[in-house]
Amino acid sequence: MNRRAFLKTSGAGLLVAGAGVGWAQSGLRPLPVIPLTDLSGGIDGRIGLALKPAQHDFGTGAASDTFGINNSYLGPVLRVKQGQTLPFDVMNGIGEVSTLHWHGLHIPGEVDGGPHQEIAPGQTWSPDVPITQGASMNWFHSHTHGKTAQQTYKGLAGVLLVEDDASLSADLPKTYGVDDFTLILQDKAFDGSGKLTYALSAEVFEEGFTGESLVVNGAIAPVGQTVPSGLVRLRILNACNARFLTLSLATGPLTVIASDGGFLASAVETDSLFMSPGERYEVLVDMRNADSNSLMVGFEAGEGLLGFLGALLGNGPEQTALTLTRTATPGFEGAMPDALAILAPPDPTTATVTRSFALTMEDGADLAALAANWGNVCGDGGMGINGQPMNMDRIDEKVRKGDTEIWRISVDGQLHPFHIHGCSFRILSEQGAEPPAYAQGWKDMVHVENGWSDVLVTFNYEAPEHAPYMYHCHILEHEDCGMMGQFSVT
Ligand code: C2O
Ligand code: CU
Ligand code: CU
């Protein structure tokens, strides 16, 4: 069934699902400040991360079955420093196979936490993860072959902030939970009793799973937070399975200071910030003269019917995610920054290799059967890259360490967010055009829709064939369905 037919026949279903929007109308909840584990001053012993089943109330009044990492839902915010080696003990207590991938870290394939580094139930995985890169907002999430979507949706995700000497001394707000907040944005579906739901179908594989409720750090939006008078820093992760988010402020432009892999060359002002699943951006909000301001989030409207239903239900294209209210306390005294980092424009003439990746979505029974054979989970369709679904036993590309390459990712049709492990890259073009200014710094995610996008990338760490890196669509249902490939770096 194509997208349009699906939307027509499921209109009634959407109305029922839309009832869940009521959860969002029961007032402003306090912003949950995710517990911080600050290791940047030194690490004492091993760092324990316990994956466990838990119960969590998102704000519906009902306890939902979730997974947490040391918490009842999601993991701690880990704050570490360039030059450290992180001795993790990842304990798998969820009763099924899992993995934990460090998304954004430039680390060897052996400790990357991809689908080859399975942790059996009851077992502990103990990688020593070297942090060589500079200040950046990274995250960690399940990457279990065929189960990434379900496990991440239930809560196996967290944020890892890398600091360096420059970021620690930078003239920027950095008091966690006071003027420096980490926001994990997700969309969730709840049943009539307020419990978290997740169901797969052929249509869900095609579109990716979306919920009607916006959740911030595990609480249904809108959430509120008081802040001192000054600049406020928001470090934002789109941890949705499949939903693109359009961010803006109720009053004034957003000031973007960093993308996936680090600081931008200089602050970028923008009226809206378009974030795919997997992307991170840091923004500053000026609370020196405003009594309050709100971070607004627009769900991708999709096709006409979805937008229409959304408006009908009072859940228009934009909703309040977070309202900041200023107190009389003086906060960060500095001004909006100008120069942030030294970042030369990417130079495509340095590339010695070009590779092409065509994302494919087909109803092809062959592709679907192959996918099923190789442990990908799918509906009736098949998905792959360059005509082949993900196969754990096949190395798709062999990259030479230190080479600079151009990767051209193409697709006919729907928008996909493409991610590459083990690196940060620069976007040369998105659908043949220059990317928005806020996406011109270090990235590990690029958008591809109806055409192609080019990135310039160098891999500086090894990934042997038994521990390869992945590249994939970050719509997690697409990844699980086989829109993923693997490469070695030697
Ligand atoms: Cu965020 Cu391969 O993952
Ligand atoms: Cu990754
Ligand atoms: Cu996709």
Image (tube, rainbow, N blue to C red):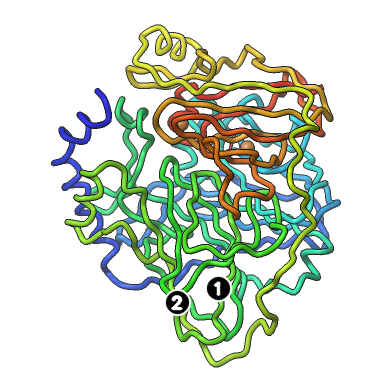
Question: Residue 314's image quarter?
Answer: bottom left
> Could you tell me how far apart the alpha carbons at marks 1 and 2 are, in whole angstroms?
8 Å
According to the picture, the residue beneath numbered tag 2 turns out to be 293
Ligand 1 - quadrant of the structure image: top right
Rendering quarter of residue 241:
top left
Q: Amino acid at mark 2?
A: Asn
Q: Residues within 10 Å of mark 2 (few under 14, many from 20)?
A: some
Residue behind mark 1: 285
Q: From where the camera sits, is residue 90 visible?
A: no
Locate the N terminus and report the quarter of the image it occupies: top left
Relative depth, front residue between 4 and 30: 4
Residue, x 56% and y 78% (percent of image)?
Answer: 286
Instruction: Say which element carries label 1.
Output: strand
Badge number at residue 132 = none
Residue 41 lies, with reference to residue 419, above or below; the image says: below
Q: Quadrant of the C terminus?
A: top right
20 lies left or right of 83? left
Vertical relation: 393 (above or below) 20: above
Question: Measured from the top left, where is residue 154 in percent x and y?
Answer: 44, 44
Q: Is residue 468 above or below residue 367?
A: below
Residue at 46% in and 49% down: 54
